[in-house]
Image: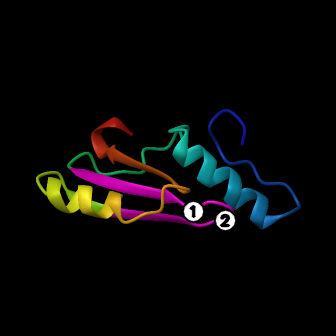
Amino acid sequence: MANGEVTRFKGDQVGIEILTGQALMDMNLRQKLFDADKTYVIDHESNSIYNDITKFDNDKKSEIEKEFAKYPKEDATVILRGSDS
């Protein structure tokens, strides 16, 4: 990760996935990836390279909260308004 951008050199794809997941959780990606009129639940599984991103309409608050609550407390999980990305 260099200045909020993924930089790849010859090497490990797993390392790139881990850094990209960390950048998502730190809100440190430069490119606007999210729709302004949506809300996202982003989960980074503990001890894993995997990220789950689920998109919702902004007015679906109960569904957003239900999705957030289904992930284990050991994971890093955030709710992100697309307009804040």
Q: How far from the left and from the top, in percent, is residue 56?
A: 23, 60
Q: Can you tell which quarter of the image residue 83 is in?
A: top left
Q: In what element is the residue under mark 1?
A: loop
Which residues, given as a range, are shown in magenta?
38-54
Q: Is residue 72 left or right of residue 63?
A: right
Helix, strand or loop at mark 2: loop
Front residue of this view, candidates 8 and 48: 48
Q: How crowded is mark 1: few (under 14 residues within 10 Å), some or many (20 or more)?
A: some
Quarter of the image with the N terminus in it? top right
Local packing at callout 2 (Cα closer than 10 Å; few below 14, some 14-19, many 20+) is few
The label on residue 30 is: none
Query: Residue shown at 33%/59% (left/top)?
Result: 69
Front-lying residue, 8 or 42: 42
The residue drawn where x is 74% and y is 48% is: 7
- Please state which amino acid type lies under the numbered disc 1: Glu
Residue farthest toward the right in the current orientation of the protein: 10
> Which residue sits at x=66%, y=65%?
48
Residue type, mark 2 in image: Ser
Residue 65: x and y, percent?
25, 55
Which residue does the numbered mark 2 point to in the structure image? Answer: 48
Which residue carries the number 1 mark? 45
Residues under numbered marks 1 and 2 in contact, where contact means CB atoms less than 8 Å apart: yes
Residue 68: x and y, percent? 34, 57
Q: Which residue is drawn at 78% across and 58% down?
A: 15
Residue 40 forms part of the magenta stretch: yes
Question: Height in image: 57 above or below 24?
Answer: below
The x and y percentages for residue 30 are 53, 38
